[in-house]
Image (cartoon, helix red, strand yellow):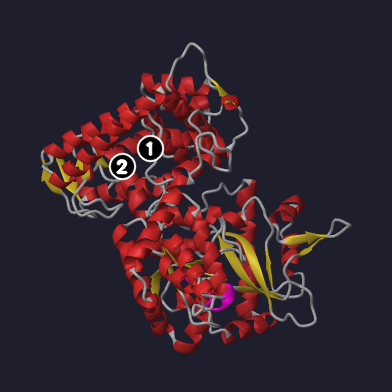
Amino acid sequence: MARIPRTVIDEVRNSVDIVDVIGRYVQLKKAGKNFTGLCPFHNEQTPSFSVNAEKQYYHCFGCGRSGNVFQFLMDYQHISFVEAVTAVAKDAGISLPDQYVQSADRPTTPADSENGQLLQLHQKAAELYHYILVGTPAGEAGLRYLTRRGVSRELIDQFQLGFAPEQQVLKAYCDKEKLDYQLLRKSGLFTEDHAGQLHDRFAERVMYPIKNRRGQVIAFSGRLLSTDQTDLPKYLNSPETPLFNKRRTLFNLDQARKAARQDGKLYLFEGFMDVISAFGAGVQAGIASMGTSFTEEQVGIIHRTTTQLNICYDGDQAGQNAIDRAIKLVESQPTGNLQVRVVQLPAGVDPDEYVQRFGAEKFRQYLASQEETTVDFYLRFLRQGRNLDQQGDRMDYLNQVLKVIAKVPTPLEQDLYLTKLAQEFSLDKAALQSQLTQLSSRSGGNQPRSGQDYRGRVTDQPPVAAVEARPQIKISRAELAEQMLLYYMLHSQEVWAHVTATTGFHFVHERYQTLYLLAASYFTEHGDYSVADFLNYLNEDELRLTLSQVEQLRINPAVQMPVVDDCMRIITRQTPLDDQIDQVQKQLREANTLNNTELVMKLTVKLVNLLKEQQQYKAEETN
């Protein structure tokens, strides 16, 4: 797919009115020069979402989201930049040339590149395995297995399921096509013996194609039909390849992300068959991790795809332990507004079995009616192994549960859980509240102190050994952190993903925030970062000067994530308070213009607290 020229992007953006586009998703009302409404990106009762018709951008004073018409569609519909440009162009009646349009069935990787050839090989392998399953005697055993599991022919075709026979069919096909030996070695579809001969990796297995978010086959998982008298693994996955990284891959994400746009949630299942059975039952937003592992990278992908994750694992002890691990993993990541819910199936029954026993409609009803919060899950989970009739176990249980409730962000929700505990155990609610307050205070007091060294350490100053700024340029601590962070973001995909996965993050100074937003647009059009290319991409001298200052920093090229986290903390929490005060004062003036009484009160309280914090901060510096 050819890069969309900047002139085309500008033409498409200028061809529509952002008020008209956003007005289809948000109820907007005229307020002075702007239009206001309830923000679609966070829950609120009073409008704080403002659309500027003159300058064609939006901004939410509540959650801080802002951008142009492309950014709105990307965030609201969870689509790529190219998809957003295509959607706006279609809306404006502008026909984009084929080379600029990203089609769902068109590989975005050039066909003649190595990755393009690997994608073609995997697609051919999927077609071959599928044909063997549904159209040859060699696949009858696999077809019988899937039929017994309740998988219809429609689902077999939908997921392109296949069968790898004992014969070396894939290697024979590749030899016939005279495919490159080194390409086959890198594909992960073959094993290599001591003599350098290649053999089909998968044999006598039902084949589940693993696809990327664009629906392209990048790997396989093979399920052994019989595990009797063999030490072979029940499931065999493709190894890591240039196409496939299991930590960054989720089964069925390509189809689930489309369904998630409709109801705003994804279902995390344990196995491929659970996802397939749920899909057949009408629940198409199901995904599964590769094997038993659920990773930080997968949490980040989910966070960027939807606002709610429903964990739906087996109802047995192993399933409950897996739910516990998944919740803790999600809570340990910067997932912003991602809500986690648990759907606990009956003990000994997984989603696949539930569909087969009770049918599709009952399954859908169960998922809809059995959603519970993570706190409700722990109220039940923490009872395991304890005799609550004994005082020691009961006290231990209550202490553990109160630690969970202490993390609940709203006082009202905390109150509901305390009432529930007080009634069940015939306790004084005030005593529970007192204990909860102590736990919350203790938790706050145990936050890492300035300079404390640990995995995500936080310091008042950027680590001295990490950077040496040019002595003639005197900048504040906060601006130095902004420069360091922007440098690492531009030069490291890992840092870029880490920062952009943090909901609501923004740079304090406008020029760094502008560079960040322009870089996001730049990376959608360029594969790799080039200082020269990016400088040409900028059309303002001030921005070019700022980028030059960033590039002149003498920074350790080896990325250290604790340093990155330090910079983010300084920017978001330790930024000079006058900048924050100035920002709130501007927002307050805007809120007064909009006659938004509730927002004025909220911002006034925030301003008073910031002024108090400023006085305290100055007093600490003096001491």
Q: Is residue 574 above or below residue 548?
A: below
Q: Residue at x 40, y 29 (%)?
A: 512
Q: Earlier in the sequence, mark 2 or mark 1?
A: 2
Q: Name the element at disc 2.
A: loop
| Residue type, numbered disc 2 | Gly
Magenta span of residues = 311-318
| Residue type, numbered disc 1 | His
Q: Is residue 255 above or below residue 133?
A: above
Q: Position of residue 545 (x, y in %)?
A: 42, 19
Q: Is residue 250 left or right of residue 508?
A: right
Q: Position of residue 169 (x, y in %)?
A: 73, 69
Viewer-proximal residue among 53 and 298? 298
Residue to which mark 1 is pinned: 506
Q: Is residue 53 left or right of residue 260?
A: left
**Residue 3 falls in which quadrant of the image?**
top left
Q: Position of residue 426 (x, y in %)?
A: 36, 76
The answer to whether residue 325 is visible is: yes
Q: Residue at x 30, y 45 (%)?
A: 63
Circle 1 crowding by C-alpha within 10 Å: few under 14, some 14–19, many from 20 = many
Q: Main secondary structure of the magenta part?
A: loop
- Image quadrant containing the C terminus: top left
Q: Is residue 394 above or below residue 146?
A: above
Circle 2 crowding by C-alpha within 10 Å: few under 14, some 14–19, many from 20 = some
Q: Name the element at disc 1.
A: loop
Residue most extreme to the right:
195
Residue to which mark 2 is pinned: 64
Q: Residue at x 64, y 67 (%)?
A: 221
Q: Position of residue 532 (x, y in %)?
A: 51, 24
